[in-house]
Amino acid sequence: MAKAIVRLKEGYKTTIESRDHVYHADEPLDAGGSNEGPTPVEMFMGALGSCIAITMRLYAERKGWPLEGVEVALDFERFNGKDYPGYEGDAMFVHEIRESIVLHGDLSEEQREKILEIAEKCPVARIVDLPSFFKREVLEALPE
């Protein structure tokens, strides 16, 4: 289970604590932030790309395949649900995430196809793909 504690005191800069790590998210100057970190959406895209790359590396290592490196570029765009081609649901908005992946190493075409198939099963992608439910609790203070 992944846990994070996020604190916002002034402006838009947040301090995020995960395990033994402390990092920040912020908004750019032109959006009123202090530009001291990536935006939350940029962090999400980085987390998704990292998860895809790590999942592919773990699978290739388990199979003993010569995957020497991975590059993942991600972008997304929000569309009105009713205007998105082929979408028949009732969501107000849909998000299209575009991936560009480069696999480095002397891989066969079959190995490349399987590694790309496995990429779709990374834990962060599954959070996006599968139903997720928010359970909110309002506290006086977060546990230290």
Image (spheres, helix red, strand yellow):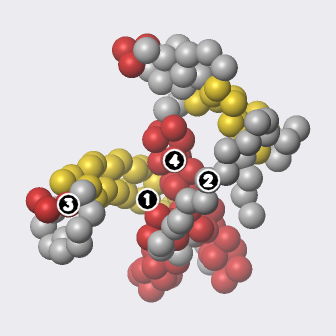
Image quarter of residue 88: bottom left
Closest to the observer, 52 or 5: 5
Q: Look at mark 2 in the image and give the residue it sits on.
A: 136
Instruction: Return the mark for residue 81.
Output: 3
In primary-sequence order, the first of circles 1 and 2 is 1
Q: Earlier in the sequence, mark 4 or mark 3?
A: 4
Label 1 element class: strand
Instruction: Please state, as top left, top right, bottom left or bottom right, where the C terminus lies in the image.
Output: top right
Locate the N terminus and report the quarter of the image it occupies.
Answer: bottom right
Q: 14 above or below 20?
A: above
Quick one: SS at disc 3? helix
Residue at left offset 62%, top offset 75%: 60
Between the C-alphas of marks 4 and 1, the distance is 20 Å
Q: Tag 2: residue type?
A: Arg
Task: Indicate the quadrant where residue 51 lies.
Answer: bottom right
- Mark drawn on residue 102: 1
* Distance in Å between CA atoms under marks 2 and 3: 26 Å
Q: Position of residue 79 (x, y in %)?
A: 21, 52
Q: Residues within 10 Å of mark 3 (few under 14, many from 20)?
A: some
Mark-to-mark CA distance, 4 and 2? 20 Å
Cα–Cα gap, marks 4 and 3 = 21 Å
Q: Is residue 1 left or right of residue 135?
A: right
Q: Which mark is residue 44?
A: 4
Q: Nearer the viewer, mark 2 or mark 3?
A: 2
Q: Is residue 32 above or below residue 111?
A: above
Mark closest to the chain's N terminus, 2 or 3: 3
Q: Dot 1: few (<14), some (14–19), or many (≥20) neighbours within 10 Å?
A: few
